[in-house]
Structures are given as C-alpha cells and as structure tokens.
Amino acid sequence: MRHFIRSAAVAIAMAAATTTLTLSAALAADISGAGATFPYPIYAKWADTYKKDTGVGLNYQSIGSGGGIKQIKAKTVTFGASDAPLKGDELEAAGLAQFPMVMGGIVPVVNLEGIKPGELVLDGPTLADIFLGKITSWDDEAIKKLNPDVKLPSQAIAVVHRSDGSGTTFNFTYYLGDVSADWKEKVGVDKAVEWPVGIGAKGNEGVANNVSQTGGAIGYVEYAYAKQNKLTHTDMINKDGKKVEPTAAAFSAAAANADWSSQPGYGV
C-alpha cells in the first residue's frame, strides 16, 4: 500500500483493500467476512451476484479494518479485509495469507453551501494544516490562494475523522505525513491516531453522515461513499502542481503504477 500511495498519479490519498484468509479455510455453506468499510459497496454487490449464481451466501460485516483483523486472527470469519496490510511476521504467526482485492480512492468531502463537487481545490499541505487545526476558517488565506475565483464563507471548519481502527485512516494519514513534516512529527501514521481536532465517527458511513449534517464540515471517505451520499468532494493539487479530479480513470492510472510483486507480505 505504501508504494501505491507514493507512486499514485494523483494527490488524493489512494488505498487498496487487502483480503486476508486463513490458510486452512475451506468453503462452507456460507462465506463470512469482516473488516474495512472502504470496500463494502463492491463486496455487497458481489455478494448479491454470487448468491444468485451459486446459492452460497456471503455475509460481510463492515466494521473497520481493525475489527476485521481481530476477527480473522481469532478465526471467527472466513476472511478479513483491511486497507492496511499485515506484516509478514503477523501473517506467519496467525497462519494467514493476504492479497489485494479492490482499489479505490479516498477523497476529502466538505459541506459548504453554494460549493459544487470539484469546485473547491486543496493541496496536501493545506489539507494537513486543516486536520492539524492550524487552519480553522474556510476563508483562511491559504485556502483563498488556491481558490481565487470561489466565494469562500467566513465559517468555522468542522473536522470529521474516523473514531474506529481504520485502514482508510491509515492511508489518509500516510498521505498527510508524506506531504507535511509537521503532521508526520506530531500525529504520525496509523489505523487510529490522536487527532489534534475534530469529532470522530465510525466507518465511512459515519463520516459521510456527519459531514452531510454539519455545516462547514470536512472529512475523508472512500469515493463511492461520496457519490452514494451526494457529498461535495474537493479536487486536489498533485505533486506536479496540477489539479486532479477523483475519477475512475485517475484511480486506474494510479493502480497501473502499483508494483505488487515488490511488496512484502503477499503470499498469494
């Protein structure tokens, strides 16, 4: 995942959902899984189709990457899904194998009256300063400089972040640490961090719901949740200084540059 983020063609933090299986698991009447909320929309569609085609059910609990890792290690599910990969020694100790399943994009989403999806533009350092609590108003000079033609409100920024152990958070904080030395030093990278500001919500669903109900809010979700909940995403300035919109083509371009063969811990 780390190489994938670093080599991503867009400045939006990218993620890949990893499926972790017990090596001794065999298909039963039904398949059970638990973990990341990030891939839930596509897993739900796959489950419906698989049930129709085979008669075998697939029950996936969208509880967050941390919960999925705990359940697969406890062997209470057939597979666990996490946006943050397990290390090789963890896999060996638990008798697990992992491989990439789904790729998508994590996007910042905002609730600002009169602002359309993609109209607001942010860059990495500015996004990091917002989540650090250093930028507290939407008409801050740093945001105005990036958006000279956008009428920004004099409104307090309400940060919304994940409250649970989250692979989405792992990838989002990895990106922030990559673009901001201040973030890397003060907050760091993990599935759960000590957030400097904001309110917590459980799952991509919880963040999407909180942002949609809170004026002036900003959060981060997998792109499908932004689309499903009709949230306003921001565009981002990439490392080449170009504005990039989150699209399937942009995500595919980033995925095409991912070198999975060089990544440790992928046994399948």
Image: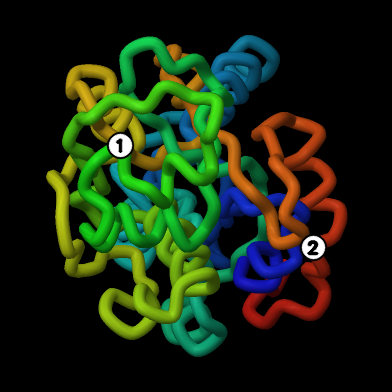
The residue closer to the viewer here, 176 or 264, is: 176
Amino acid bearing label 2: Ala
| Quadrant in the picture for the C terminus | bottom right
Q: In this view, does 6 lie above or below 231?
A: below
Is 170 positioned to the left or the right of 159 in the image? Answer: right
Q: Residues within 10 Å of mark 1 (few under 14, many from 20)?
A: many
Residue position for label 2: 258
Question: What is the C-alpha distance between the residues marked 1 and 2?
Answer: 35 Å
Q: Can residue 232 be seen in this view?
A: yes
Is 28 positioned to the left or the right of 53 in the image? Answer: left
- Residue pictured at 21% horizontal, 48% vertical: 136
Amino acid bearing label 1: Trp
The residue closer to the viewer here, 182 or 155, is: 155
Residue 209 pos. (x, y %)? 25, 23
Choose top left, top right, bottom left or bottom right for residue 74: bottom left
Q: In this view, does 228 lie above or below 103?
A: above
| Quadrant in the picture for the N terminus | bottom right
- Residue pictured at 73% horizontal, 58% vertical: 8
N-term mark: 1 or 2: 1
Q: Helix, strand or loop at disc 1?
A: loop
- Residue pictured at 48% horizontal, 51% vertical: 81
Residue 125 pos. (x, y %)? 47, 62
